[in-house]
Amino acid sequence: MNILQVMAGAAHGGAETAFEDMCLALESAKGTLGITQKIVLRNNNPERVARLRAAGIEVFTLPFGGPIDLYTTWAMKRIIAHYGPRIVQTWLARAALKTPTTQTPKSYLKVSRLGGYYDLKYFKTSDYFITITPDIAQYLEGNGIEREKIKHINNFAESNDDEGGSYEVGKITREEFRAQMQTPPDALVILALSRYHSVKALDILIKAIIDIPAAHLWLAGEGPERKNLEDLAASLNVKKRTHFLGWRNDRAALLGAADICAFPSRYEPFGTTFVQAWAHKIPLICSNAQGPKQYVRDHEDGLMFDVDNIEQLKGAINELVGDEDLRQRLVAAGFNRYKNEFSCDEIIKHYINFYREILAKNNLVEPVALSEINHG
């Protein structure tokens, strides 16, 4: 099965990270899956392109510009004609808009992966939809998309430590890694993996640590609110304890060296961060934004607080600090959720089975049930 992945997102972001993770996972398992894969990307992140090409994937870069950009769709038609994909999967609205409409009779299916409540005018020519939450699937149905054209499949997270071994990144210990972050070895490290954007509510997290003197924030991300957040930390006298790390590609190392993973978003359709916390066995604190509240169970696999409620967030941090048994229970339950619902192998299996199912319905391939994946 030939698959063409199309991403026209920003240089950095959650959907972009999920896209890269998915492409790398498919490439790693392609021998078992019986697939080939090529990628079309917006030409705004050379580091991502380099990582994907280093994994052996052929990557095309196109501008994905505005209405006057006719070149992207023309070039996409040529790529599709030459490669002959059976599945063309689009990520985000502009990719769907610029991807050519399938012809009759169909030679491929256009599948749009939705991670939010997007305006469906951009997806008029999509044949099928993959949604990352049940609520987004209901949104599609409520807007006239036929149920049989929608499939809910969770995002996945990878764990580098399924057996719970000691933390190490190459030859760098946890303490040495903290030292690189200019963080004391005995600090309470609270990590947020997030864009610097107002919807991510990092300002609430900064305010929450004012009265927790041992707390250091690691803010791993980038975005338009950076200057405002830096100014806020300075004005509250927590600048030395608030570390703006920029966009990072070492999530496992950060999660392994932190004490708490915080996810304070005001708005979040899904939010892979909570799954990453579960996968890497770190206690989770998150807001009850729309995405997390569909999955996280308060005081079972994470602690939850009301959106924008600083006192509840501060209370959750202090509760975790003072209760080792609670921390262990949350970590164990979260890791179990990860293995059963969000592991890479399980999610990739769901994707491939869905591809095969819809291709068979459209007489493009014979149905093949995929029961196991040896994910290398």
Image (spheres, rainbow, N blue to C red):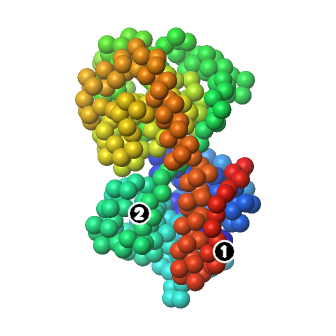
Q: Residue at x 69, y 51 (%)?
A: 375
Q: Nearer the viewer, residue 351 or 340?
A: 340
Dot 1 alpha-carbon crowd within 10 angstroms: few under 14, some 14 to 19, many 20 or more: some
Query: Upstream in the sequence, badge 2 or badge 1?
Result: 1
Q: Position of residue 111 (x, y in %)?
A: 49, 69
Which residue extends farthest bottom?
Answer: 105
Q: Position of residue 223 (x, y in %)?
A: 41, 40
Residue type marked 1: Tyr
Q: Residue at x 46, y 19 (%)?
A: 325
Q: Nearer the viewer, residue 139 or 211?
A: 139
Q: Measured along the vertical axis of the image, is residue 10 above or below residue 215?
A: below
Residue type marked 2: Ala
Tell me the distance, in whole angstroms, between the alpha carbons under discs 2 and 1: 23 Å
Is residue 19 in view?
A: yes
**How many circles with numbers are drawn on the protein?**
2
| Left or right of 212 in this view: 157 | right
Q: Which residue is mark 1?
A: 83
Q: Nearer the viewer, residue 158 or 253?
A: 158
Q: Residue at x 45, y 38 (%)?
A: 274
Quadrant of residue 311 within the rendered picture: top left
Q: Measured along the vertical axis of the image, is residue 346 above or below residue 197?
A: below
Q: Which residue is mark 2?
A: 93
| Left or right of 314 in this view: 328 | right
Q: Residue at x 56, y 69 (%)?
A: 355
Q: Position of residue 254 (x, y in %)?
A: 55, 29
